[in-house]
Amino acid sequence: MPFELIRTKVIGRVGWITLDRPDALNALNAAMVGEIASALAAFGADPDIGCVVLTGSERAFAAGADIKEAGERTYPETFIEDFLASWDAVARMRKPLVAAVAGYALGGGCEVVLMCDVVIAADTARFGLPEVKIGVMPGAGGTQRLVRAVGKAKAMDLCLTGRMMEASEAERSGLVSRVVPASDLLAEAQAVAEAISTKSRINTMAIKEAVNRAFETSLSEGLLFERRTFQALFATLDQKEGMAAFAEKRAPQFRNK
Ligand code: HXC
């Protein structure tokens, strides 16, 4: 896949997307978001890929949406073009997404992290929604997804002051799954993504849908969705294989069927 602002690679059954705009601390301009969407679509359609890792550089996962590109925009333009709507491609990805975050994850960078499923942070990671400092507010899901991730009081604190939080606070708050030394970040992300990608794809995609349903619906509807999805898995060969392998004390061979 020929890209200019991201790099992609495949390790085993894991697809990697590395944001690669070092001069701007991986600020997310429209072209970069388009490339991320294309790479996700390709990995999503690739039957050999079970999980995707999204990462940046040691200095920045992404320091936000591109402020310089957005500065002169007008309201009519942003409305008619539905500015930032294209970012939903990340949230729409059906296969599990692991964010591997070192350095700054600010503004839109933090919002992309909030769209991912598992978040591995280096101890150097810094998270924040500093849009309030530049005369706007989070616009790619930050006010909604951050509340659901860390609760109202912490979300208000971060959105209203624009302050950054360190990896340890982000982990305590529930934004981050685990924190590791910066030197271990990529290996840890690969290990997590590999663990996911060796499971039955039907299971991992169903689990992602069910967990995300918790954000969209009432408890009783969510529980019903979970139970029906769980029951549906008994129509898969991978359920038979997984349970037979347990009984026979061997590793399961999932075939995504
Ligand atoms: C465009 C950016 C950028 C951004 C950094 N750069 N962040 N360019 N958009 N979001 C550029 C700088 O202009 C600079 O380019 C280069 O990257 C290096 O950044 P420095 O500021 O020199 O680095 P440093 O002093 O280490 O400070 C790092 C930083 C700071 C604390 C992360 O860059 C910063 O505050 N960035 C903005 C963070 C932010 O507000 N993010 C939210 C954006 S709004 P030059 O060419 O000068 O060397 C958002 C949603 C709103 O995400 C949607 C509308 C855009």
Image (cartoon, grey):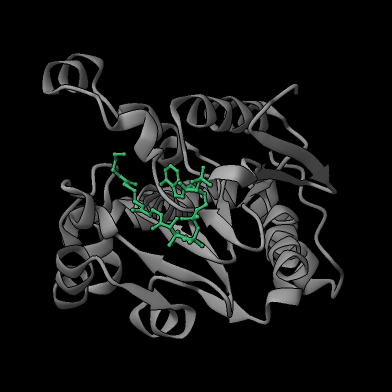
Q: Residue at x 41, y 67 (%)?
A: 127
- Tell me if residue 231 can be seen: no
Image quadrant assignment for residue 220: bottom left
Q: Is residue 191 above or below residue 205?
A: below
Residue 114 visible here: yes
Q: Residue at x 38, y 29 (%)?
A: 69
* Residue at 37 percent of width and 47 percent of height: 108
Q: Position of residue 97 (x, y in %)?
A: 56, 50
Of 192 and 231, the residue lying toward us:
192
Relative depth, front residue between 90 and 78: 78
Left or right placement of residue 248 versus residue 147 in this view: right
Residue 70 locus on image (x, y percent): 31, 31
Residue 2 % position (x, y): 75, 21
Is 194 on the left-hand or right-hand side of 106?
right
Quarter occupied by residue 35: top right
Q: Quadrant of the N terminus?
A: top right
**Residue at left 30%, top 51%?**
213
Tell me: 253 left or right of 60. right
Q: Above or below — where is 108 with respect to 35?
A: below
Could you say which quadrant of the image residue 87 lies in?
top left
